[in-house]
Amino acid sequence: MIENKMKDLVKQINKAAYEYHTLDQPSITDQEYDRLIQLLEQYEKDYPEYIQNDSPLKRVGGTILEGFEKANHKVPMLSLSNVFNEEEVVNFVTRIKKDIDHLELVCELKIDGLAMSLTYENGMLVRAATRGDGVTGEDVTTNIKTIKTIPLKLSKPIDIEVRGEVYMSKSAFDKLNIDKKKNGEQIFANPRNAAAGSVRQLDSKITAKRELDFIAYSLINNEDLSINNHYDAMMFLEELGFKVNPKIILIRSEKELIEHINKIIPIRDSLNYEIDGIVIKVNKFSEQQKLGFTEKTPRWATAFKFPAEEVSTKLLDIVFTVGRTGQITPNAVLEPVRVSGSLVSRATLHNEDNVIKKDIRINDMVLIRKAGDVIPEVIRSIKEKRDINSKEFKMITNCPVCDSVLIKKEVAYFCVNPDCDAKNIEKLSHFVSRDAMNIEGLGERIIEDFYNLGYLKTIPDIYSLINHKEELKNLEGFGNKSIENLMFEIDKSKNQSFEKLLFGLGIPQIGKKTAKTLAKYFNNIDSIMEAKYEELVEIRDVGPIIAKNIIEYFEDQNNVATINILKKIGINMQLETNSADNKLEDLTFVITGKLSKYSRDEATKIIEDNGGKVSGSVSSKTDYLLLGEDGGSKKVAAEKLGIKIINENDFEKMVK
Ligand code: IVH
């Protein structure tokens, strides 16, 4: 029968591809492989009704998307805490030892790519989603299906969620950039950007051409599979057809752990993929549950980050940028060099005093590194190599963008022109950023474009973009869907929490934490606006400088006008009350088993809408376990820890 023949052919090709890409042990020649592919192509053309769901020909990419759909994570995708040296590693081990009987850890390499969640139903890949903000990512299934080391069909017909890292090998990255250069296109700064950029292509045929790879590092619904530790989960994933971390190792003592780390550091550069550290995880799931989570990271795992690389290069020039508050920062323009995985051509020099104190000059050879592995900075100049062309640094006196005279406050210079373009763009970017109003789809470059086109000058203009919807849809690089999504995001942000709005206003030196404190203390914007210096300065986290900044901010009539317009638009400017919506405030729930009245997503939404939190595993921090049918190990864990177990009826009573 033709159908069976096609099934066999798919199986044969998938096996060969798995041996080639995942195991790195090819069993047939390239010619033989191509012959099988051609044969399958012919069959699929002649008998499209028999095309198999896991056909390798589905990996070539499909229709062009207008944008990505949102994808919610049932279990939030968290990040890892970091440790930077031996002492911090030891502290981590000491801390976890308090809660567990025998130390049993797993170490893996921390591959530098992007996190991906893969959902399989009945053994078939049904969804691939990016991490996004950890709760909601983007559905990138079509693109992910092009990655050859991601099985479209597992060796068992089970329902699982697998997470891991999508990355690009160093050799694939170099090849891609050579091609890009040849075509006069802009090159990628590092393999991580290249991988992320490839995953976010609207045309999956482009993704298919990029050589992406995937390594699995976690199995989410382990409880349903009676696997009780991480190492076994990884071996199980290997059996299912995934590539797992090649250097995965079980560790049973602190000494072994340190030895392992010291063994990996020198081989870092010889690997064909970028790694930025070593992930250390508690092996047993029961112990992971016991240790639980902080708000953003598991307590049962951490990442040892490699020491920041220090590299020398030539400082070609010093240029100045204007921040949101008007603060001027001197930046070094460098001869491009690779530092900790990316090409660096700019680095911060912080402020005038720093440059003068360190006597850093144009044309000097300088030492640079990435502070906290993110922002490149100049550490010092290598004076032994200074030549006669070195030019002494001179601070500017006027704003590089609007030319107004700069004012010095303490160590920094400021542009105080309220209408400076650079400041306006930075203010807008800050307002929409993730920790502020979190308006997705309004990145810095788009803001700059909209600003220069005259659609966006001030914060309230964001909410008038809807009046230009049709024009925006016609702009190059935008489409119906992306603009519709943007409008939706903008509208949604009107209900953003008060603390995030407050942070977004960009009052100098008010960070996320202070914004939260102020929001809780004053409840609404009017009370903050009326507050006196004496009252402000008394509040925890608010010192004299911040108090003064708040007073000055609200004395400025432009800011008051902005707030009044935002109020009229309907932006939320008060703390959600404790009444209707916050019945579950500060309570953490874990949901397990099958619920009859809601899906897990729906129950999660109800809890979050009522101010509660949902966590993926039971720990001492859990307040309630919402138990559906067949809740297994989580029920046992909750009973052990004496956590309240409720059913759907109890839950309904709580939120009604
Ligand atoms: S475990 C709850 N294991 O590092 C912790 N992460 O900051 C889940 N990463 O977003 C992560 N290699 O993208 C884990 N072997 C590994 C990893 C790994 C790379 C990335 C991952 C995550 C980030 C954590």
Image (cartoon, grey):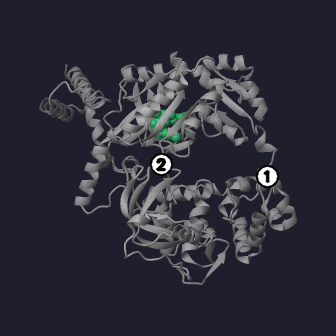
For this view, does 41 lie left or right of residue 146?
Answer: left
Q: Inspect this view and state whether residue 573 appears.
A: yes
Quarter of the rendering occupied by the C terminus? top right
- In percent of width and height, residue 594 lies at 60, 23
SS for tag 1? helix
> What percent of the width, then of the height, locates residue 509?
68, 63
Label 2 vs 1, first from the N-terminus: 2
Q: How many marks?
A: 2
Q: Amino acid at mark 2?
A: Ala
Position of residue 298 in the picture relative to residue 242 (left or right): right
Mark 2 vs mark 1: in front = 2
User: Mark 1 vs ligand 1: CB under 8 Å?
Assistant: no
The circle on residue 520 is 1
Task: Give the Cα separation between the discs numbered 2 and 1.
Answer: 38 Å
Q: Is residue 325 above or below residue 586?
A: below
430 to 371, vertically: above or below: below
User: Identity of the amino acid at label 1?
Assistant: Lys
Image quadrant containing the N terminus: top left
Q: Nearer the viewer, residue 157 or 357?
A: 357
Residue 75: image location, x then y, percent: 57, 33
Q: Which residue is mark 2?
A: 308
Residue 211 picture location, percent across and down: 29, 43
Q: Residue 617: tell me if it is visible.
A: no
Q: At numbered mark 2, what does the secondary structure look like: helix, strand or loop?
A: loop
